[in-house]
């Protein structure tokens, strides 16, 4: 199955290089390009997109704002941030807003392609240099959690495995459930916890000692 990608980058020569790298993999296809976040939103209206590969610092609308707007309207679309800026605050905000990964442009083509496939499977990819700075902040536990976690034992078990980075297929195999049942459980969990997607669920699970 072809993974349809929207490439958002304000420098034409960088876009061309990224497109060549991405399409080395026969499953990946750049179906649209944009030079800023506002243009990316327009492209989303006119194309079926599976994943957005997006820079952070761009004119008109940056990648942080665009991530928030895209996930608010197209919750199922994956977003992978790719930038030259090792800025942990940018990374934290985009991940909280629903991005599935954050890579520096120093990453080679193999790592980029692997990150895209990982995002599409529900994984989270964070460049090592960025992870060293932001993971401790993401996993900081609240000083006091005044409310009990409103999940059943089965939902807690699934939330725990999501927090450990397991895919739906791996969770289904471990708990002897069908893939559809796992998907339904995760939808229920997200609704109960008022979370947007499994990335936020993974962060929640770790912060609240579920996993």
Image (spheres, helix red, strand yellow):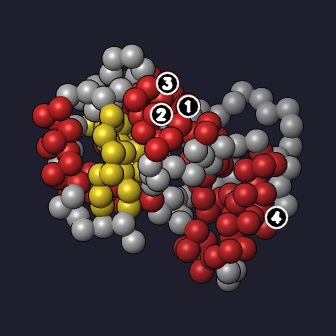
Distance, label 4 to label 1, CA atoms, is 34 Å
Residue 79: x, y in percent? 45, 44
* Residue displayed at 30% across by 67% down: 27
| Residue 66 against residue 164 in the figure, above or below | above
Residue nearer the viewer, 187 or 48? 48
Label disc, if present, on residue 65 of the rendered structure: 3
* Residue displayed at 86% across by 43% down: 148
| Residue 94 against residue 32 in the figure, above or below | above
Residue underneath mark 2: 41
Q: Residues within 10 Å of mark 4 (few under 14, many from 20)?
A: few
Q: Quadrant of residue 10?
A: top left
Labels 4 and 1: the sequence-earlier one: 1
State left or right for residue 195 relative to residue 112. right
Distance, label 2 to label 4, CA atoms, is 40 Å
Q: Are marks 2 and 4 in contact (CB under 8 Å)?
A: no
Residue furthest toward the top?
60
Residue nearer the viewer, 169 or 55? 55
Where disc 3 sits, the SS reads helix
Q: Are marks 4 and 1 in contact (CB under 8 Å)?
A: no
Q: Are marks 2 and 1 in contact (CB under 8 Å)?
A: yes
Distance, label 2 to label 3, CA atoms, is 11 Å
Residue underneath mark 1: 69
State which mark lies toward you, 2 or 4.
2
Q: Are marks 1 and 3 in contact (CB under 8 Å)?
A: yes
Label disc, if present, on residue 153 of the rendered structure: 4
State which mark lies toward you, 4 or 1.
1
Where is the N terminus found, in terms of image quarters? Answer: bottom left
* Residue displayed at 20% across by 38% down: 15
State left or right for residue 69 relative to residue 44. right
Determine if residue 129 is in view: no
Q: Quadrant of residue 38?
A: top left
């Amino acid at each position: 199955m072809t993974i349809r990608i929207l490439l958002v980058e304000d420098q034409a020569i960088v876009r061309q290089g990224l497109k060549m790298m991405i399409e080395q993999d026969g499953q990946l296809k750049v179906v649209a390009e944009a030079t800023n976040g506002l243009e990316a939103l327009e492209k989303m209206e006119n194309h079926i997109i599976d994943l957005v590969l997006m820079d952070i610092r761009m004119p008109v609308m940056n990648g942080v704002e665009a991530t928030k707007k895209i996930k608010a309207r197209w919750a199922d679309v994956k977003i992978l941030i790719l930038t030259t800026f090792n800025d942990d605050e940018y990374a934290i905000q985009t991940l909280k807003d629903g991005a599935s990964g954050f890579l520096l442009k120093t990453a080679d083509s193999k790592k980029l392609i692997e990150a895209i496939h990982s995002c599409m499977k529900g994984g989270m990819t964070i460049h090592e240099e960025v992870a060293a700075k932001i993971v401790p902040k993401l996993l900081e536990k609240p000083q006091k959690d005044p409310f009990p976690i409103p999940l059943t034992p089965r939902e807690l078990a699934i939330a725990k495995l999501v927090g450990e980075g397991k895919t739906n297929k791996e969770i289904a195999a471990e708990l002897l459930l069908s893939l559809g049942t796992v998907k339904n459980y995760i939808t229920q969990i997200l609704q109960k916890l008022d979370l947007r997607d499994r990335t936020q669920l993974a962060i929640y699970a770790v912060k609240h000692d579920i996993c």
